[in-house]
Image (cartoon, helix red, strand yellow):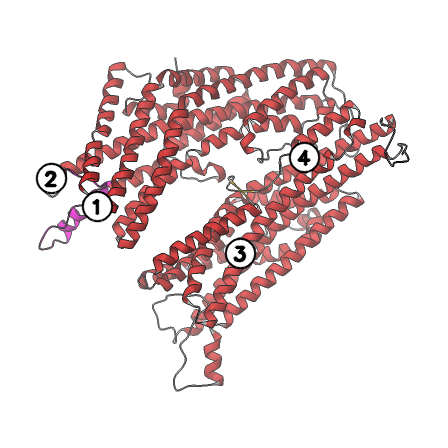
C-alpha cells in the first residue's frame, strides 16, 4: 500500500520501527516496543526527583536535575505525541504515497526526488558534504550519535585509567548524567552504567525517529510547493513560443494565440488543483505536530537557560570534564533549535509561486487567465507573510544571467569583461594578488591561492601552542582566542571564493552585461555614481587597513630602534605585532619570527580587502540597478502629464491619457519591469553567493568585539598595546558596519521603487497600465535585501543587535576574568 513511501523514506521507517513508533508495523510488536521505551523513559523520573530532593542545597545538582528532567520530558512527549496523533500521522504517510502517483511529470518527479534525497541525507549518515543552505539537514544524526558516544565513554575513562595507570586506590566513578540511586555507585557501577546508557540511547533513537519523520513530511510539503511553482513557470512560458522578438530582444507581440491560451488555461487549472493538495497536506501536518512543536519550544527555551547557568557554574568551578559535558548538552539544544528551520523553509516555498506569477508578463494575459492569477497570488502571499523579504525572482527576458555555461579566460576575458574592468579594475588588482580573481590564469590563480591558504593555516599550530602553554594567563588566552578568530576569518574568505567561484563569475559577467542593457543617460549616470562610490570605498578601506597594519608592523621594531638610538646595558625585550608561541628564544630568532608574522598579517589583510570590497562593489551595483529603475519609472509616469491642460490652480484637468502616449508609456513600462527583474535576479545570485560567509563573519566579529574589549581592560596603562587594540576594536566595528550598511542601502533602494510608483496618478491610466502598476507595487513593497545564512537580514538593526550582544558577552568575559 505504501510502495512509493517506503521506496523514498524507508530509513525513517527503520528508526521509527526500533522504538515501536512506525504506525504500520505489527500491532503486537508496535505496542510492546512502544511500552518498553515509554516505561524506560518514565522510570528515570523517580531518580531525578531523588537527585533534586537529596541535593537541594547544591545549585549545580539542582540545575542538573532540572535540565535532565526536561530532556526526559521531551523524549516522553514524542512517544505520547505519536500515540495521540497516530490517525493523522497515518494520513500523512498515505498522502505522501498518493502524491507520487499524482505529481508524475518529469519536472515534478525530479523536484520531489531532490527533496526526498535531502530528507534521506538528514536521517542517514552517508553524506559528509556540506552545501550552503542544506547545512542544517546533513550530518545531524552523526553529530547526535557522536555526542551520545562521548556521553557513554565518560564513565569508562576512570575504569580505563585504573587499568592502564593504576593508583593506590580506585579513581572515583562518574556517570554520563547525574543520577541518585541512594546506593554505593562504586559497588553498582556496571548496573547503573548500563541503565543510564540504555535510557540515553532509547531517548536519542526516539528523537531521531520522530524528528526525522517531521523533517521528511516538511520536506515533502516543500517539494509540492516547489513543483507547483516550477509548473507555473513552465506553463506560462508557453505563451512566448510564437511571439516575435524585436531588435532589442524584447517580445513585441503582446497578445496570446487563442489555441495557446486554451492549453494554458486547462493546464493552469490542473496546477491549481495540485496546489490545493499541497495546502491540504500542510494543514494535516500542522495539526499533527502543533502541540508537540509548542511543547518542544518551551522545553528548549527552559533548557537553554538552565544549561547557560550550568555552564557558568562549571567555568567558575574550573572543571574541564564538566565543561565538555555541558558543551555536549548545548550541542543537542542547538541541533534541536535548527530543526525549526524546517518551518521557515516550508513558509518560504509558496513564495516562488507568487513571484513567478508576478515575474511573468501579466500584460499579455486574457481576462479569464488573469482572474486565475489573482487568487493564487493572494493565497501564496498569505503563506509567506512572515518571510516577505525573501527574494526569489525569475528572468523571462533573453538577458538571463543565471545560466552561464562557459568560463572565459585569457584575451577573451578582456573583451568580454571590458565594462567590468573599466569600472572595477582596482577590485581585480586586490583579488589577483591573492589568487582570488576568477578570470586570471588557472596555474597562477591556483598557485597564489594555495600559498595564501597554507600561510594562514600554518599559523593555527602556534596559536594552539600559545593557548596550551599560557592557559593560566587570561591575557594570553584572550590573545590566542581573538587571533584564532582573525585567522579563521581570513581562511573562510579564501574557501568562500573557491566554493562559490561559479556564482562569483556569474556576478562579474552580469555586471558587465548590465552596462550594455542600462544604456540611456539617466541610467548610466546613476550607475557611474555608484561605481565612484564603490571605488572610493575600496581606496579608503584599503588605506585604513594598511595604516592599521603599519602600526602593527612598527610595534616590534620600536625596541630595536631604541636599542640603536638609546642603547642600554642589555637589549630591550622583543615584542611582536601578534602574540605567538614558537617555543624558541625570541631574541635569537627575532628576524625570522618578525618576517613570518608580518607576512601572515599582510596576506590576511589583502584577502580581507579583496573579498570585502568585491562584495561591496556588487552590492553597490545592485543598488544602482534599483535606483536606475526607480528613476525610469518616475520619468515614464511623468510623461502622462506632458500633454494635459493645467488649471489656474496648477492642477491637471485632463484626466485621461492620450492613446498614443498610453501605448508609448505601456511599452516603456514593460521594458522597465524587465530591467527590474534583472536587478532582482542579480541580488538573488549575490545573496546566495555571500550568505554563508556573511553569517560566519557576523559570528566571528561578535566574538572578537567582546574579546578585544576585555583585552583593552588589561592594557589601559600600556600605551603601545592600548593603541594597537583600540585600532583593532575600531576596525571590527567598521567591518561590521560595512557588512550591515550595504544590506540596508540595498533594501532602501529596492523599496524606493514602491514609493515612486505609489506617487503616480494611477486613476488616469488605462486598465492594462493599472494592472502593471499594481504588480509593481505588490512586488516592490517587499524589500530586496541580503541575508546572512539565509536567516539574519543585513541591516542597521542587525548592526545594533550584534553590538548589543557583543557588549553582553564583554560583560560576561569581564566577570570571568575577575
Q: Which mark is residue 677?
A: 4
Position of residue 621 relative to residue 43, above or below, is below
Q: Mark 1 or mark 2, which is nearer the start of the sequence?
A: 1
494 inside magenta stretch: no
The answer to which of marks 1 and 3 sits earlier in the sequence is 1
Q: Which mark is first along the chain, 1 or 4?
A: 1
Q: Closer to the camera: disc 1 or disc 3?
A: 1
Measured Cα–Cα span from mark 2 to mark 1: 20 Å
**Are discs 3 and 2 less than 8 Å apart at CB?**
no
Residue drawn 28% across the image and 25% down it:
18
Q: Earlier in the sequence, mark 2 or mark 4?
A: 2
* Residue sitting at the far front: 649
Residue 252 x, y percent position in the rendering: 78, 27
Q: Residue 507: percent from the left, percent from the top?
A: 62, 44
Find numbered disc 3 in the image and state the secondary structure of the residue it sits on: helix
Q: Tag on residue 57?
A: 1
The residue at the point 70 percent across, 15 percent down is 368
Mark 2 — residue? 183
Q: For mark 4, does the 10 Å Cα neighbourhood hold few (<14), some (14 to 19), or many (20 or more) residues?
A: many
- Residue 733: give its label: 3
Amino acid at each position: 500500500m505504501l510502495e512509493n513511501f517506503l521506496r523514498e523514506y524507508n530509513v525513517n521507517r527503520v528508526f521509527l520501527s526500533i522504538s515501536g513508533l512506525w504506525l504500520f508495523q505489527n500491532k503486537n510488536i508496535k505496542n510492546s516496543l512502544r511500552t518498553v521505551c515509554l516505561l524506560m523513559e518514565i522510570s528515570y523520573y523517580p531518580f531525578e526527583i531523588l537527585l533534586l530532593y537529596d541535593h537541594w542545597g547544591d545549585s549545580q545538582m539542582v540545575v542538573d536535575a532540572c535540565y535532565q528532567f526536561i530532556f526526559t520530558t521531551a523524549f516522553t512527549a514524542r512517544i505520547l505525541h505519536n500515540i495521540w496523533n497516530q490517525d493523522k500521522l497515518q494520513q500523512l504517510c498515505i498522502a505522501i504515497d498518493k502524491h507520487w502517483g499524482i505529481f508524475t511529470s518529469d519536472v515534478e518527479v525530479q523536484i520531489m526526488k531532490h527533496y526526498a534525497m535531502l530528507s534521506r541525507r538528514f536521517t542517514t549518515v552517508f553524506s559528509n558534504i556540506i552545501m550552503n543552505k542544506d547545512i542544517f539537514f546533513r550530518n545531524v544524526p552523526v553529530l547526535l550519535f557522536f555526542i551520545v558516544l562521548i556521553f557513554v565513554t565518560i564513565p569508562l575513562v576512570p575504569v580505563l585509567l585504573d587499568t592502564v595507570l593504576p593508583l593506590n586506590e580506585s579513581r572515583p566513578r562518574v556517570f554520563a548524567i547525574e543520577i541518585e540511586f541512594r546506593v554505593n555507585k562504586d559497588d553498582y557501577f556496571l548496573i547503573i552504567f548500563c541503565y543510564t546508557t540504555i535510557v540515553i540511547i532509547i531517548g536519542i533513537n526516539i528523537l531521531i525517529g520522530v524528528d526525522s519523520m517531521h523533517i521528511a513530511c516538511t520536506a515533502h510539503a516543500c517539494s509540492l510547493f516547489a513543483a507547483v511553482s516550477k509548473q507555473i513557470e513552465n506553463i506560462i512560458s508557453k505563451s512566448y513560443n510564437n511571439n516575435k522578438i524585436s531588435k532589442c530582444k524584447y517580445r513585441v507581440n503582446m497578445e496570446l494565440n487563442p489555441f495557446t491560451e486554451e492549453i494554458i488555461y486547462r493546464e493552469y487549472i490542473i496546477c491549481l488543483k495540485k496546489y490545493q493538495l499541497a495546502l491540504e497536506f500542510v494543514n494535516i501536518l500542522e495539526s499533527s505536530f502543533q502541540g508537540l512543536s509548542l511543547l518542544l519550544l518551551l522545553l528548549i527555551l527552559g533548557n537553554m537557560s538552565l544549561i547557560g547557568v550550568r555552564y557558568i557554574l562549571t567555568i567558575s568551578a574550573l572543571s574541564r570534564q564538566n565543561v565538555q559535558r555541558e558543551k555536549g548538552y548545548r550541542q543537542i539544544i542547538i541541533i534541536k533549535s535548527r530543526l525549526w528551520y524546517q518551518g521557515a523553509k516550508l513558509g518560504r516555498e509558496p513564495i516562488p509561486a507568487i513571484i513567478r506569477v508576478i515575474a511573468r508578463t501579466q500584460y499579455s494575459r486574457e481576462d479569464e487567465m488573469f482572474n486565475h492569477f489573482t487568487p493564487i497570488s493572494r493565497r501564496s502571499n498569505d503563506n509567506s507573510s512572515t518571510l516577505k523579504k525573501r527574494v526569489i525572482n525569475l528572468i523571462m527576458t533573453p538577458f538571463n544571467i543565471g545560466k552561464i555555461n562557459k568560463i572565459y579566460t585569457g584575451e577573451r576575458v578582456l573583451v568580454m569583461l571590458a565594462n567590468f574592468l573599466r569600472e572595477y579594475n582596482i577590485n581585480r588588482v586586490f583579488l589577483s594578488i591573492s589568487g582570488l580573481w576568477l578570470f586570471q590564469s588557472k596555474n597562477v590563480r591556483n598557485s597564489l591561492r594555495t600559498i595564501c591558504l597554507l600561510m594562514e593555516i600554518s599559523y593555527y599550530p602556534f596559536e594552539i601552542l600559545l593557548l596550551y602553554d599560557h592557559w593560566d594567563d587570561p591575557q594570553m588566552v584572550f590573545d590566542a582566542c581573538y587571533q584564532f578568530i582573525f585567522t579563521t576569518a581570513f581562511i573562510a574568505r579564501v574557501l568562500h571564493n573557491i566554493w562559490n567561484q561559479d556564482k562569483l563569475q556569474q556576478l562579474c559577467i552580469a555586471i558587465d552585461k548590465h552596462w550594455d542593457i542600462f544604456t540611456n543617460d539617466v541610467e548610466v549616470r546613476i550607475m557611474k555614481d555608484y561605481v565612484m562610490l564603490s571605488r572610493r570605498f575600496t581606496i579608503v578601506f584599503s588605506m585604513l587597513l594598511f595604516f592599521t597594519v603599519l602600526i602593527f608592523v612598527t610595534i616590534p621594531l620600536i625596541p630595536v630602534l631604541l636599542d640603536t638610538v638609546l642603547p642600554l646595558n642589555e637589549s630591550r625585550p622583543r615584542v611582536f605585532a601578534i602574540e605567538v608561541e614558537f617555543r624558541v628564544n625570541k631574541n635569537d630568532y627575532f628576524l625570522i619570527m618578525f618576517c613570518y608574522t608580518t607576512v601572515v598579517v599582510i596576506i590576511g589583510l589583502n584577502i580581507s580587502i579583496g573579498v570585502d570590497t568585491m562584495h561591496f562593489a556588487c552590492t553597490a551595483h545592485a543598488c544602482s540597478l534599483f535606483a536606475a529603475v526607480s528613476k525610469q519609472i518616475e520619468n515614464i509616469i511623468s510623461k502622462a502629464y506632458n500633454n494635459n491642460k493645467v488649471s489656474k490652480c496648477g492642477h491637471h484637468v485632463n484626466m485621461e491619457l492620450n492613446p498614443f502616449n498610453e501605448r508609448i508609456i505601456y511599452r516603456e513600462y514593460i521594458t522597465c519591469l524587465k530591467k527590474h527583474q534583472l536587478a532582482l535576479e542579480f541580488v538573488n545570485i549575490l545573496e546566495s553567493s555571500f550568505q554563508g560567509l556573511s553569517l560566519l563573519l557576523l559570528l566571528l566579529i561578535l566574538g572578537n568585539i567582546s574579546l578585544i574589549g576585555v583585552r583593552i581592560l588589561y592594557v589601559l596603562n600600556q600605551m603601545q598595546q592600548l593603541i594597537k587594540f583600540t585600532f583593532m576594536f575600531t576596525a571590527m566595528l567598521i567591518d561590521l558596519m560595512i557588512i550591515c550598511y550595504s544590506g540596508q542601502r540595498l533594501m532602501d533602494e529596492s523599496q524606493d521603487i514602491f514609493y515612486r510608483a505609489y506617487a503616480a496618478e494611477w486613476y488616469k491610466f488605462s486598465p492594462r497600465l493599472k494592472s502593471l502598476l499594481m504588480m509593481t507595487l505588490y512586488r516592490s513593497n517587499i524589500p530586496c535585501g541580503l541575508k546572512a545564512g539565509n536567516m539574519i537580514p543585513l541591516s542597521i538593526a542587525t548592526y545594533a543587535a550584534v553590538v548589543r550582544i557583543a557588549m553582553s558577552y564583554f560583560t560576561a568575559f569581564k566577570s570571568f576574568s575577575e
